[in-house]
Amino acid sequence: MQVAVLNDQDLILNYLDGNEKAFEMLLNRHRQRIYTQIYLFVKDQALAEDIFQEVFIKIVHTIRKGKYNHEGKFLQWALRIAYNMCVDYHRKQKRRPTVSPTETFDIFDVLQITDDNAEQKIIRSQTHDRIRALVDKLPPEQREVVILRHYADMSFKEISQLTRVSINTALGRMRYALINIRKMIDQNEGVLQR
């Protein structure tokens, strides 16, 4: 006998009917994706955890007040809340998102890359550092699209919904980001190959 897997909307309705486990299932279903997006913006594990908790507190309050619109798009809605909270944090701190590793997390550590030898590891690490530095030099809108696409692994449709621009605008920003990165590489005479 197979047990039916409840969709997000069913879990929300069950939660509203008093089933706390339903919200726990919803949280567990989307925890990693939402946390990863937050972390990629703030680059600090403790801060990402704090914002993550604030996101779910806001979600709980919105659902309990009956203000959640049942369109079957819970994850997109939750990602939008997380994105807005990260943007608010950066505005308050007058900081911008950068692509740089910390002592506890480096996005390149989770990528599946087979290393042949120590020399290739060093070269790859230096290349990743240089790419991160180039991404950090991009204008904010272009940097944001690169981070969301390549580091958060979001589709252009998801990026356009999250940033509230058209898909063509998101694609255009990525195109200009790549053009600008190529220009910076050319200006630095092959910065990636040094």
Image (cartoon, helix red, strand yellow):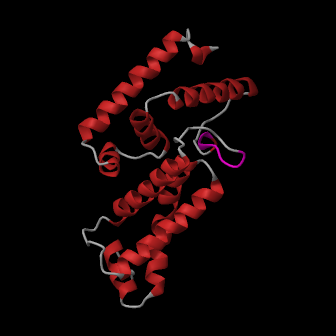
Name the quadrant of the C terminus: top right
Residue at the location (49% across, 78% down)? 24
Task: Say whether residue 4 is visible.
Answer: no
Residue at the location (43% across, 40% down)? 144
Residue 114 coordinates in the image, percent (x, y): 63, 35
Residue at the location (46% across, 28% down)? 138
Residue at the location (61% across, 25% down)? 127
* Depth order, front residue of 117/59: 59
- Please count the marks in the image: 0
Residue 96 coordinates in the image, percent (x, y): 52, 41
Left or right: residue 69 versus residue 40 is left
Residue 53 coordinates in the image, percent (x, y): 54, 68
Residue 46 coordinates in the image, percent (x, y): 65, 58
Left or right: residue 171 versus residue 28 is left
Quadrant in the picture for residue 45: bottom right
In this view, 113 is above or below 127:
below
Q: Which residues are magenta?
A: 103-108
Name the quadrant of the N terminus: bottom left
Quadrant in the picture for residue 18: bottom left
In this view, 63 is above or below 116:
below
